Amino acid sequence: MGLSLSGWLGGIPAKMKKDAPSSSSFLPLSIPTSSRLSLLLNSSPVDPGDPRCRWSPTHCSPHFLLSQCGEEVTRAPTQQISDGARGEKGERGGMHVWEVLWCPTHRGSHAVIGVSTEHCPLQTSGYTALMGGDSQSWGWELTNNQLWHAGQALGRYTGERGVQAEEQSVSPPHPVPERVLLVLDADTGALGYVVDDCFLGMAFKDLPQGVELFPAISSVRGGAFIRLCYLNGATREPPALMALCGLSIHVSMGKERETQTDRLPLPPPLQRYILPSM
């Protein structure tokens, strides 16, 4: 059966592999993911009722209006103020992935996605990158790709690898689409992002370990609408061999064959095991 399965998978055309969109400007910037992160990105999301899918009603600027479900915030039109919001639940350990949906036309300047401790301020006067504006927060400004921490601009996150810094400074920033995945490795103290199915590497390292870190955003645009969804998480234990085998099959099949597991030369129970996490 093993040889038969290998032959079936090996016959899939390269163009049908589960890759990032070829038209994405982020594709040249992507780096390989660890097996731990790959499993999270290819697993079914947690129940939508999970509290990690909600913005906090208390850790939130009064200018952000929460939806009834708590998964969405909308910034009220306000002049000369920067406002922030945090997730209802943070994490102290493990690897975790959140999805943030933020329409590019509703961002304005200083639209930032990142993480913070519970001590980061959630409002300040003037227009600024609030997340990353102090030592208790780390953020990626979507409009110019700038990374921020402790009030310092640390350079572009998506700079072309192998390109000199002076060349990057004059090149236009990469346009960030609506969907951004926030990847927090609380075990190693690192934060990164996934855009267009491209993992761009860890943007920040040396985050405090053992401290509760929350997904966080900041905005200055009236009407900005931001949705939060917790996708999945994992402990630092090595992934199970069965899960790694399932991941290998998923990647080999590609999105175009997600519903064709019945063609695999596998017993029905194994076909059902593969299908739910596609």
Image (cartoon, helix red, strand yellow):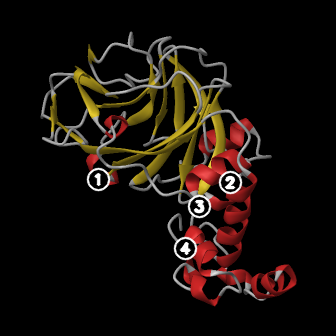
Say which element carries label 3.
loop
The residue to which callout 4 is attached is: 272
Q: How far apart are marks 1 and 2 (CA)?
A: 25 Å
Query: Marks 4 and 2: CB-CB under 8 Å?
Result: no
Which tag, 3 or 4, sits closer to the chain's start?
A: 3
Side (left or right) of 25 relative to 224: right
Q: How crowded is mark 2: few (under 14 residues within 10 Å), some or many (20 or more)?
A: some
Residue 197 at what x, y percent from top left?
57, 59
Tag shown at residue 25 = 3
Q: Is residue 6 above or below residue 77?
A: below
Say which element carries label 1.
helix
Which residue is at 82% across, 87% downward?
4
Q: How far apart are marks 4 and 2 (CA)?
A: 31 Å
Say which element carries label 2.
loop
Asked whether the viewer can see residue 160, the reply is: no
The residue to which callout 1 is attached is: 105
Which tag, 1 or 4, sits closer to the chain's start?
A: 1
